[in-house]
Image: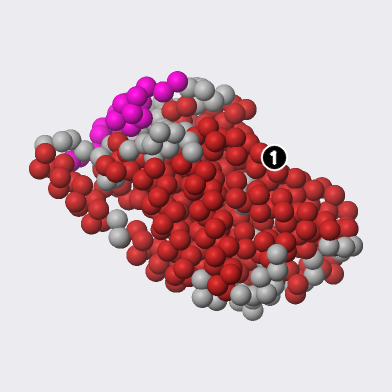
Amino acid sequence: MTAPSSTEPARPTESSAGTPRRRTFGLAAATALVMGNIIGGGIFALPATVAPYGTVSLLAFAVLSVAAVLLALLFGKLARRSPVTGGLYVYPRDAFGPFAGFLSAWSYWTMCWVSIAALAVAVVGYVDVLIPLHGNHLLEGLVAVAALWLPAAANFAGTRVVGMVQIVCTILKFVPLLLIATVGLFFVHTDNFGPFNATGDSVPGAVAASAALLLYSFLGVESAAVSAGEVDDPERTVGRASILGTLGSALVYLLGTVAVFGLVPHAQLAQSGAPFADAVDAITGGHWGGTAIALVAVVSITGCLNGWILLAAQMPYAAARDGLFPASFAKTGKGGVPGFGVWACAVLGTALIALNYTAGPDTTFRVLVLITTFTGCVPYLLSAAAQLYWLVQGSRAQVRPAGLARDLTVAALSFAFSFWLIAGAGYAAVYQGVLFLFAGIPVYVWLRGRQEQAGTPA
């Protein structure tokens, strides 16, 4: 089946969105959505994860912030053409056909449940501050699994409960981040920063490797584009909200990470399982502050898991209604939550934790984050390629000819940055990520075979 013609802009359809949606997000709400999804739970563990690279990781953060803004610009442009819910799988599908759309949806869904496993592992370090686990890997694995299944159970109660939990946890999430990013800067000691490049590798190599880890903290830049069907005036609002939300998140991240690097000695930070708790202990001179932050971090990360589990269930739900995922994912429970999708991501996340939990939580978190980088960058690559296709074809609607060079530059740099980040993830992460990606091909073959047999259009 050929790809739809790109001479006319795509419009919201019932196949893409189920039923016509009432647009409810203005600029402020869409910006908050982007910031809320970008600033998740991963930032609570990432300073310690990138510390072994040295302060070169702060340079990587700055470079990655530029890349995230470029992606925000890209999604804003793509939303002008296809202002519908589904974003990252709608763009490749419209440009290259259903197989490209399926690969993007499958990869994004994989990124979601791998992220869930990574977040569950990130809880362990902060639980250890509250209840010492004494390095017992079995206990650490059980804590990670419990952190995954508790919010999964909340999802079965319905979207209303998910929303209530999310509001409380989002407020708590900003407490330690803002505290460290503001007050913490006054207690920084330059001796704590350690060497600029602690890897012994070249600076470009160290920047690429640390940026591949740090991308995890910027996942969510596409949130407004994915939810474009619910955004007022998406042709204008999605781009603005993506840029504002990304810039605000980058500022909080960069200030917070600089403060943690300056508050905790480099050697201690590289071994820390709870870097923000250690940073607050350095400010207060005792352990009560770190214990309080650890409690807030546990609640915050659990709340972030609550939202990501719902997102991981909704992406295959939307694709299943288009016939690009098994029909079971399109079934919703009494509370309006796609129950099978919740079960699937919880079971897969548990299996991934068990598979990778062999060398301690820090190593496990690092491996899972790098797999997330690969699976998250695949939809970014395909979306950038779709934009390049429409621009090169010369028939993309609603784009002024005067902006062609600018749009080509944004799309080409977005593609290049995504490719660079995949390369920086390393062989092991790319190997496992490719296995996850190719595992979806038999699913697509089966679905298309059934569609052809039934005479149903893709």
The residue carrying mark 1 is 171
Residue at left offset 25%, top offset 34%: 4
Is residue 422 positioned above or below 229 on the image?
A: below
Q: Does 4 appear in magenta?
A: yes
The N terminus appears in which quarter of the rendering?
A: top left
Percent of width and height locating residue 424:
51, 65
Residue at left offset 42%, top offset 64%: 351
Total number of numbered labels?
1
Percent of width and height locating residue 299:
66, 49
Percent of width and height locating residue 264:
79, 66
Q: Nearer the viewer, residue 168 or 142?
A: 142
Residue 392 appears in view: no
The local crowd at label 1, few if under 14, some if 14 to 19, many if 20 or more residues have their Cα within 10 Å, is few
- Picture quadrant of residue 329: top left
Q: Is residue 43 left or right of residue 120?
A: right
- Picture quadrant of residue 245: top right
- Point out the residue furthest to the bottom here: 200
Which amino acid is tagged 1? Ile
Q: Which residues are magenta?
A: 1-22
Q: Is residue 150 left or right of residue 2?
A: right
Percent of width and height locating residue 285:
89, 62
Is residue 3 positioned above or below 426 on the image?
A: above
Q: Nearer the viewer, residue 251 or 124?
A: 124
Residue at left offset 72%, top offset 61%: 130
Is residue 61 positioned above or below 240 on the image?
A: below
Question: Tag 1's secondary structure?
Answer: helix
